[in-house]
Image: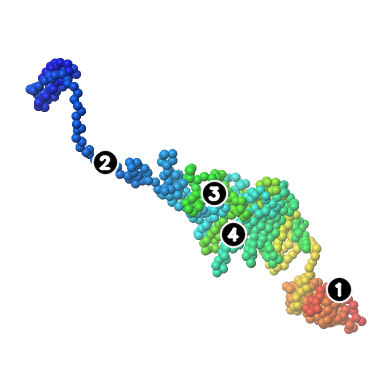
Amino acid sequence: MSVDVTTSSGNTIDVSVSGSNTVSLTQSLTSISVSTPAVSTITVTEKGPKGDTGATGATGATGATGATGATATAGDGIDIADGEVSTDLKSNGGLVIESTELAVDLGASSITGTLAVGDGGTGATSLTDNAILTGTGSSAITAEANAAYNGNDLTLTSSTSDKPVLTLKNTNTTITSGAELKFLKDAADISAGETLGSIGWYGDNDAGTPETIQYAKIVTRADDIADGAEAGRLYLQVANYDGALTNGVFIDGDTDADDEVDVTIGAGAASVTTIAGTLTMGSTAAMTNAGQLSVAAQPNITTMTGFLGGTANALITDDGDGTVTSEANATYANDSLQLSSSVTQKPTLELINSNTDAEPPYLMFQKTANGTNNDGLGIIKFRGDDDGGNITDFAKIEGKIEAAADGSEEGELNITVNARGNIRNGFRAQGNGTDIVDTDIGYGTTSKTTVAGVLQIDGNAIYDDDTALCIQFDSSGNTEIKNKFKADTREFNVPGTSDGDHAAGDVVFFGSTEGMTAGKIYYYTSGGAWAEANAGADATATGLLAIALGSSSNNDGMLLRGMVTPSAPAGSDDEGKKVYLRATDGAVTTTAPSSSGNFVRIVGYMLHASNDAIYFCPDNTYVEIA
């Protein structure tokens, strides 16, 4: 239903609708529409003109209180005060405000938790002081308790037999080179005689409180650093009876001659140098080349940017408090491990074994490629600057494959030094068959090999450099000198006090005479035997005379001339007195025979006033008393 209403200007229309109906007014306010139901009551009243504005009405009553709003509560790490929200940060916990923004400080001292390796961390909560770090895949970095580096010293420790082992592994197939243990002294002011490096062997003694003792050492020095004339010295030392280190082998390249290396073996006049096999000698002070003996007076860590800094390729060590240090003096790059130090006698490489068995730690050089003859296996080099600032090799120790045949392998060890710019062998040991090791000592025919003490040869011959036999020994201790023997001086000592004692002289071993008396004088008979001499007859006084050195002429020998103690010489023992054959079987006297028919023959001279020693030298002339 709709109703059209028209009003005069300024009037209003009141519309009341009963029931649940809808009333709509048109925009012109002249038409009213009422929706269902169809029956409705509409009252339209036209009012008069609008009156004047009335006075302001009284203030209305206060409205009802609104509903309570939701309360904001601060959680962990959040503070609300006076309507302001702020963060509650742990002191040195790692979260900081930088330029109004929240940031992470990785250097904070109270950060908790562990940063995994895959996220650029270590995966560990603490690391051992100075320990070397190793990685295993994505697992946490391990601080090796038995491998430490403190900035100067790299220490490997093990309680396992034959451990620790330092292996320099070379897989290159070049036969002329191998891995190298390099000692470099790179000081700017190196001087002659400067020590370039050493290898020491230490162990405990049996004191009540065991003491660490150095039992052996290899040390090398730059003895001559003149540019173009560099020469090195190498010392192999062991602790002798009082624990002091003493040279056992001294290899000297400072001989003032090119291609010459001198070697001194042993220490002390009572020392013994044993050579197993044949000793081959060149031209030395002991033997000429002609054979004449001449006696003269971390893998799986790809980046740690922001965590470490410092030297490239540096080893990482733990300072013991979780701090990791990039060691500037310990680097590994291009397959080379380098330790550097400006401290005297540093750096050192220590292999420490605490196992109680007799097995030591060892330094291993291994080349894994299929071996061929003359392959180099490993080198220890001793290097330093000469006085021109040139890095120079002064000495080295090298191991090689002499023979690579399976089942017949033989090795070679060379100790070399710099001899005026050339590296020359001072010592070479080479396998040459089952249980045979050939050894060369020294270099050059004018080099000198000094043996301090006793030279003991377990073989039975000495050859010269032309393989000519010079000296031969037998199982009884007898020595045979081949060809010529030349001695500048023969030193004869005074013998002892027992009959037949002799210090030196000419001795023969023939006559097949037994039951002789040591110290008695004998003559050589026409039957080829020995009988007691007597000044009373021509046959027993004027022939070949000798003093028995024992009971058997062939085994103990007969002294033809030399220093000896005869059996009970008669007369006074004044030094220098003439000694005569006595008219008593096998006896001598300082009083010339005077009886008719006796033969006066001088057989020597008295050497000592109390021990009866004489110089036995029978005169070829004699006088018969009428």
Position above or below: 416 against 44: below
Q: Closer to us: mark 4 or mark 2?
A: 2
Q: Percent position (x, y) of residue 227?
A: 71, 47
Left or right, 287 with respect to 366, comes to right
Residue that carries the numbered disc 1 in the rendered image: 619
Q: Percent position (x, y) of residue 518?
A: 75, 77
For the question of whether residue 122 can be seen, the reply is yes
Quarter the C terminus occupies: bottom right
Residue type (three-letter) at the residue carrying disc 2:
Ala
Tag 4 near tag 1, CB within 8 Å = no
Q: CA distance from mark 4 to mark 1?
A: 63 Å
The secondary element bearing badge 1 is classed as loop
Q: CA distance from mark 4 to mark 3?
A: 26 Å
Comes first in the chain, label 4 or label 1: 4
Q: Closer to us: mark 4 or mark 3?
A: 3
How busy is the neighbourhood of tag 3: few (under 14 within 10 Å), some, or many (20 plus)?
Answer: many
Q: CA distance from mark 1 to mark 3?
A: 86 Å
Q: Closer to us: mark 2 or mark 1?
A: 2
In the foreground, 506 or 307: 307
